[in-house]
Structure formats: C-alpha cells, structure tokens
Amino acid sequence: MLVTLDLKALYPQMGRLLETTRLKTLIVGNVAEMTPAPETVRAHMSKNGEIVTIPKDRKHVTFEELLNNDGKYAEHPIADLRESVAVLQYTGGTTGLPKGAMLTHANLSSATAQYVETTHTQPPLLDEGRERILAVLPPFHIYALLLGIRIGAEIILHTRFDAAAVVKDICEKKVTVFPGVPTMYVAIINHPGVENLDLSSIKWCASGGAPLPLEVQKRFQDISGCRLAEGWGMTETSPTGTFTPLEGAAKPGSCGIPIPGITIKFADVDDPSRYVGLGEKGEICIGGPNVMKGYWKRADATNETMTKDGFLRTGDVGYMDDDGYIFIVDRTKDMLLCGGFNVYPRLIEEAIYQHPSVEEVIVIGIHDDYRGQSPKAFVKLKTNSSTVTLEQMKDFLKDKLGKHEMISGLEIREALPRTAVGKLSKKELYDEETKRRAAQ
C-alpha cells in the first residue's frame, strides 16, 4: 500500500509501480481538497496540467474513501519493542548509495520522549494536545517524522516551502511550533515586511539538517521573540543527538549538548578503536536507545558503522568543550548538506555522465550563504564537443535530479586532477574553492 497525490509530478511514477512491483493499492490524495478553495485550485492546476485524472478501479483508493469508515481499529500487539522494526528510513553513507536504517518501535518512542524532555521548563513549554505545528519539512525526512504526533498537536501541512504562505499561517493560525532548516529561516527573515508581522505565537522552533548561521539565528529571534534552537542528529539516531537548551547561554557555532539519554564519545580519526579526551577532535560516536538496529540487509555496512562497544560512528568530526557543548568541525563523509537535505555527489556525477559531451566529471560542495552548501560540477568535455553552459546543463539534468540536488556551478576544464594512482581527485578542487572564497 502506498500513499501519494494526484500531482503530475508524482502519480505517473507511482502508478507504474502497480505493474512492476508487489504493490497492490495506491491511496491517492487530492491536492485541491487540502486547500481553502478546492474548486478554484483544482481549475487552476488542471489548466496548468499540474494534476492528473486517477483511474477508478480496485487498485486505486481516494483519500476520501479511506476516511469513510467507522473509526474502529484492531490493535496489533508488538512482542518486542526493541527488536521489532517500525520504519525503514533511508539514508546514505560514504558511497552515497541509499541504505535503509532499521528504526524499531523502541527507537522512535525513545527519540520522541527525548525531544519532549528537551522542552521541559517551568511551567511546561509545550502543552500536549493544544499545540499547533507548522509542518513544511516533508514527512519522509526523519527530522519531521513524529514529534507532532507524540504531543498530540494539530499539524498544519504544507506541500512545499513558501515563505509567504508560512508567515501567513504563523500569523493567522497562531502556530506555536515550527521545526525548520536554515534555508527556511533565511527566507523568512528576508520576507518583505516580516518585521511588522506578529509571529509571537511561536513558543518553540528549531533548526537542523545543516549549520545555522549566527546572524540568521539572531535576526529570527529578534523578529519572532522566540529562541531558535540549533541541534544535530542523523537518520540512524531517529534522529535525536544534540540540542541547544531553551534556557542558559547559547554558544555560537555549537550544535548544543547531548539530548537526555544519549552518550557521545569521540573516536580517534586515525584509530577508531580508541577514544580521545575532552576537548580533543575526533569522530563523533553516539549511543542510546534511539540508535538504529542496523541497516536493512546490509550487515557489512552495519558492522562498518558500529564500534565494538555498540556506538554509532557518525562520520562527523568534532569536539566537546568543558561545558558539554559540541562543535562539529569537519565531515568524513563525501556527502553534502544542501538546505537540510543529504545530497550525494556520486549520484549527480552519474546524471552528468549521461550528457553526450561529457568525458569526466567531479562534483564537490561549495559554500552557499542560503543553502549551506551547493553542488558544483567540474567537467572535462569529449574531444571536438561544443562547450556546455550552466543553464544548458541544468536543463539537461532537470528530469534526472531533484531540485535540492541541482548544480549551482559549472566549470569546464581541459583536465581534472588525479591521484598518484590515476583516480579523479577532489582535494585540489576543494582547496581551490577555499582559496577563491577567501580572496573574495
């Protein structure tokens, strides 16, 4: 069973799965029905070819039909909460290939309890059953998965991020909780006239998925009056990890302290079998009831990721100061964080290699004031091929990559750097981009 929407951008791909996989039923939601003016929206989207007509057969169920029931349900007891997998949440590792993190019922219940614990103040900051969460982050993103359900909040869903729509709903619907990524806060603070609007209903907001610029944090707090807390976590940790306390001093550049119930150690980067001391840089290793059971059907990847004493190696390099605040200084993974989304250079490279003029390509992440990082491609063209512009390459890639994966830069080179054994090398390109930015 799969839930989807009647969008042209989604349904055709989902519909094909009925013929090629074990999928038996598609539950199809009507986008227009989710809006205040369904008929107007439906007419507009139909005119623009944005929605499709859904077949009427046994394989298709509308969301309206799904809700047309007596509300009764059968309970399904779970014998072992610690071992029974609730979710296969897909992530990526150093290779950039998707891996299914096996998150158990215990992982998810622990993680949501940990999140709630971080909001405890006197009086309690969040009132179960009375909060309103603005959910812009897609539910397939582990960061957005369960907190609203855990606290019984009214969840206001947006199908995509639009700063004007977000600000409007915060003001008019008195949103109290807003989890986001840095790019969203950048857009909000730059929205025309936002400083004159009333965002004071927000009681709790957090930023994750990418480093939060200090100036963005301060500006949003000035506008909303709400402390913007930065945290860090991973799909494999359900995704709890660190948080910035709601009270007390915040430290610029830090992703906070370990969430209750979590232990963090730092492994020697050169010798992961030993841990380094307080204040020393090392690979962040995390342990707790929120850490995944392992990777689905990937025992090799699980063994590579877990330490002998049961801690998860995160691939992030950082250190902890004397107050318990953690600072991330580097990444061991060849993965980019673009606007809160994991972006894998290898997948972009594979898409670019499909271009008939491309002989070789390297994709790296470059600094982006808005998204944190953006992919940039360095390309060597085939002999006698005409040059390719950035816009031409983007047009070629638009049906091969997601918007968050699209390259923001393209540089044509006569040759690409290589290692001593002849492999394409990214180190030199990263060094060049660092010097270029420093010179600006």
Image: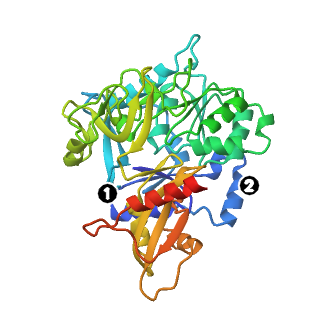
1 or 9: which is nearer to us? 9
Residue at (39, 68) in percent of width and height: 350
Q: Position of residue 212 (x, y in %)?
A: 56, 39
Farthest residue to the bottom: give it.
384
What type is the residue that disc 2 sits on?
Thr
The disc placed on residue 403 is none
Count of number-bearing discs: 2
Above or below for 24 versus 352? above
Farthest residue to the top: give it.
122
Q: Position of residue 33 (x, y in %)?
A: 64, 48
Task: Classify mark 1: residues with Cα within 10 Å, few (<14), some (14-19) or many (20+).
Answer: few
Above or below for 375 versus 361? above
149 or 394: which is nearer to us? 394
* Residue bearing the label numbered 2: 40
Left or right, 392 with respect to 237, comes to right
Would you say residue 368 is visible in this rendering? yes
* Residue bearing the label numbered 1: 22
Q: Which of marks 2 and 1 is nearer the N terminus?
A: 1
Q: Where is residue 39 in the image (x, y as percent from the top left)?
A: 71, 53
Task: Classify mark 2: residues with Cα within 10 Å, few (<14), some (14-19) or many (20+).
Answer: few
Q: Where is residue 13 in the image (x, y as percent from the top left)?
A: 45, 63
What type is the residue that disc 1 sits on?
Arg
Which element type, helix, strand or loop, lies under badge 1?
loop
Would you say residue 174 is visible in this rendering? no
Q: What quarter of the picture does the C terminus occupy?
A: bottom right
Which element type, helix, strand or loop, lies under badge 2?
helix
Q: Do the residues labelled 2 and 1 touch (CB within 8 Å)?
A: no
Distance from Cα at disc 2 to Cα at disc 1? 37 Å
Residue at (29, 36) in percent of width and height: 312
Farthest residue to the front: give it.
439
Residue 23: name its quadrant.
bottom left
